[in-house]
Image (spheres, coloured by chain):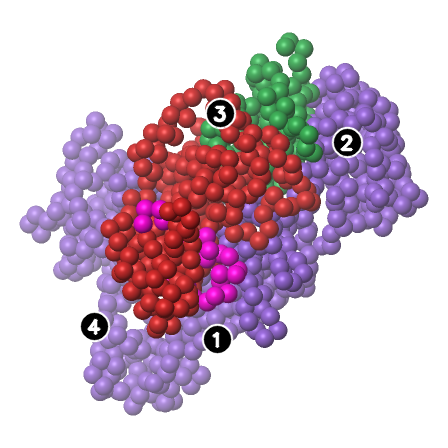
Chain colours: A purple, B green, C red
Amino acid sequence: MARIGVFICHCGENISATVDVKKVAAAASRIPGVAHSVEYKYMCSDPGQQMIKNAVREKNLTGVVVAACSPRMHEPTFRRACAEAGLNPFLCEMANIREHCSWVHEKSDATTNKAIDIVRTLVAKVKKNKALLPIKVPVTKTALVLGGGIAGIQASLDIANAGHKVILVEKQPSIGGHMSQLSETFPTLDCSQCILTPRMVEVAQHPNITLHSYSELESLDGFIGNFKARIRKKARSLDEKLCTGCGLCTQKCPTRKIASEFDAGLGLRPAIYVPFPQAVPNKPVIDREHCTYYLKGKCRLCEKICPTQAIRFDQEDEILEVEVGAVVLATGFDIKHGDFFPEYGYGKYKDVIDGLQFERLASASGPTLGEMRRPSDGRVPETVVFVACAGSRDPAKGIEYCSKICCMYTAKHAMLYKHKVHHGRPYVFYMDIRAGGKMYEEFVRRAQEVDGVQYIRGRVSRIYERGGKLVVKGADTLLGARPMEIEADLVVLATAGVANAGAEELAQKVHVSYDPYYFYSEAHPKLRPVETNTAGIFLAGACQAPKDIPESVAQASGAAAKVAGLFSQSELVREPLIAVVDRQAPPLYSTCVGCFLCQAACPYQAIEKEEIRGRDGRLIKTVAKVNPGLCQGCGTCVALCRSKSIDIQGFSHEQVYAEVLALLNRGESDV
Amino acid sequence: MSDFNPKIVAFVCNWCTYAGADLTGTSRMKYSPQVSIIRFPCTGRIDFMLLLKAFANGADGIIVSGCHPNDCHYSSGNFHARRRWIVFRGLLDFLGIDVRRVRFSWVSAAEGAKWAQLVNDTAEHVRQLGPFSGYHRLRGLGVG
Amino acid sequence: METLRDKARELLAARTVQVIIGYGQGSGGGARAVFVREAAEADALIFNEACRQNLAVYLMKPEVRKLGKAALVATPSALRTILQLAAENQVGDHDLLALAVHAAGEVTLLATLQAIEAHVTELDADLSAAEKAELRKYEALSLEQRREYWQEQFSRCLKCYACRAACPLCYCSRCTVECNQPQWIPVPAHDLGNLEWNVMRAMHLAGRCVNCGDCSRACPVAIPLYLLNQKLISDVFANFNARSGMAAKTDNAMSIFKPDDSEDFIR
């Protein structure tokens, strides 16, 4: 038999001014199952809480209802008080007779009656409450960081510096990402490599970081605190332990005319190569698609000249299995290439290039050693047109969003060009200038006012070749849409920033959601920007949306802080307000029929398949199981389940059903 | 009919509408006392059977309210609920059950005034529709 | 008919399947389900216009499952039921074969779920013009007329659950109607319990029902249950562009959402 204690708070006069609290206490005492009913000036005060604790002990209460303010205010207070008196905290409920009653209604019998209704409803609920224990999940204090661009580097360093192990996986032969390709960075114009490479070296040397370059995630299973990752270490065709990085092989390799990915196709590299001189690790990799030996079975020159005999032509991909407690996705972005802009002749005219290619042209380590020479004939371009929003903010191209970084890097490009070609004429076609950020607007102004970059507000309709020049046709909308035609030597398209080609596949591997553009979705757009909906998986950098360096770094540090927070305890303790699929005695085992309609509805991929097997290993049935590490307790599955086989602790079928009935059925006990 | 005080049950989510109704209180806005709230973690948790139970037990009107689209604490519970309500409303209407007695709304934690307005409008609306005696009579001899 | 029997004999003789679930001669010119386990008994199989029952209902019965791998004589509804059951994780590719029967008497052997999908794609899954017209007729009634109509219909309900037994998609091992903690549906067959039972059943079939009509045919008091199902089929298609029983691997319309689902009724 239930022995419920009801404690009615006056909240000074906040409640008692409009609700007849004595009457409520008297009515509550007549509700079947209520063993104790009192009212008091301030229930949340020390004496008030003491009153509850004493009653729990002395009256041997099996449940407590505190009729006072919103549970969003004091539920933790009263649950703690109950726990201190030895009552399971989840056997305490609050009846909100302040925010939802005394404050919103005039003093009247109706208001008092409503307070009684609310108390009766919560008494009915608490009678169905069950003692619950917090959920404890062990945590493996190792983080897996996917992507070794600036975001992944920052996240790895921050987590490692917090004293935790990090496994950093980079798909390319070197870490560094897009930032390593950049010439200078806005708005300070400091050299990208100069600020990045020390961080790369720090990663390589950090005792807490294990770097797997030229590797990719094969699969990820498990849940927060307890992931199992399989990593494919692609064959470098090289024994990394023996290789000293002397570079002899890359100098002697006879196959030398391969477009360099690092130089965005503007430079060349050999078949055995290090992507760039400051690469980390500074060990070459053989590009098997172009290496003569792999294509024709002959050559092996690198093997012959290698002073440490490190070349391994027969090396195979290796699969590593690691256990990690958290995952940071920092897989970055790409930009639109190729035939996406037929109207601009991109891919057709050599001198129509994209922003990353311009970075390489401007870079001192680039194919022109930083001299401004155009790709077609190596001449110094006298007139350069920069086209902002090439693809971005263009519903017709299917990219409705703003790529965010282009306004700033276009200003930077025009400025860098002007710094290198003093007599040059840079033009920028733009839609709007978005320069929100510290020193950003000032930077764009400087480009316009100090460096004399000509900004034209309007879109470019077409680019074509005429007599060795690129004719850029557009309109100046600030001059009444006056048609413009500029004869340029070089055109730089600030092409849209997009998700990586493999973004969707990776999202599916790790079970995180993504938006229609395949950028990864944060758990909450405002309040949980670095978490995903899958507990234990965090986001850093441009894989979530286009971002500049400071933003990527800030988010990476945010993700790292989340990981460090998770790793600060050896067990993850969570409120047990989660869904549970019932289990029954054999031969039923569970009323779940395994239709798994709930699985697609779960926002957290928390519903798993459990195979129930007999002693002989024979499969008896497959039923749903909620992973307590992943479930967040929304209850969407509960309302969806036809056979009512899923229930949610704290808002169970019995609890809410009892509430509805109690609310609407005033008993004889009332009024 | 004028002295008819309808019974209205509000099924609301904890994170947006419950908090919004708290704000109505903190802002001391007044509304009709005929409405009482039952708290759920999310609109996605609200079982259509509970709405039937509310009518069967004497409710004259029902409010169902949660977070605005894209604001759901659980990211998509409200979207799932919305889809369920589309189907459920159609079925009730087809069966001749007056769906005007069920008000669906999105009330955020910041919309204390909207909550007061919603309650008052619903109470007035249901008052005009009168008691839901056609449904309550169905109860017959059964238990709830 | 002979083609069907030949196919059945062949499958049983080759031990490709252990049982053929098909139609046999029933009383009074009707058809009934038969379970043919020996090639010699294949002559018991018939197919004519009386063969309307959705035999896929037997796929979910434990006593039938025990017989082994089955070949199911399948009408279009039954084929869609198989796909729906597959989408709900209840049947797999190796559990059965389908013998798709056509009015003209030919039989197509569909050995995989993929083959069933390809076959079903060719069918017109939409409600028929007559069905749509009937639905519109009821929708056009006043609210009060609809209430009276259904109250009258449900007042005859005996809560015998024949609709549930006939439905191939009502395969739960414990139906909500059997829950008593809490007692979701009142036990007696009174107006409220009858309404709640039928609303619940219809909702549980939303996005799942393949419109075979067996619930209505099974109802001993002739409640037009098919109308409820067709209403939901029509609404689910109109709102979510989804049809049940068309694919073996697909998310149920009621398990997913679109950010731009209609919300003109939400304030």
Q: Chain of mark 3?
A: C
Q: Which residue is mark 4?
A: A257
| Residue C69 numbered tag | none
Q: Is-magenta flag for residue C70?
A: yes
Q: Secondary structure at mark 2?
A: helix
What's the residue at 66%, 13% (across, down)?
B4
Q: Dot 2, how many residues are within 10 Å of its Cα: few (below 14), some (14-19), or many (20+)?
A: many
| Residue A320 numbered tag | 1
Q: Which residue is mark 2?
A: A119
Q: Which residue is mark 3?
A: C149
Q: Is-magenta flag for residue A300?
A: no
What's the residue at 27%, 49% (across, down)?
C103
Count of picture labels: 4
Residue A516, horizontal then vertical, whole percent: 38, 47
Residue A199, horizontal then vertical, whole percent: 48, 64
Of label 2 and label 4, which has the lower sequence position?
A: 2
Give the vertical position of A631 relative to B126 (above or below). Answer: below
Residue bounds of the magenta highlight: C48-72
Q: Chain of mark 2?
A: A
Left or right of residue A190, residue A599 in this image: right
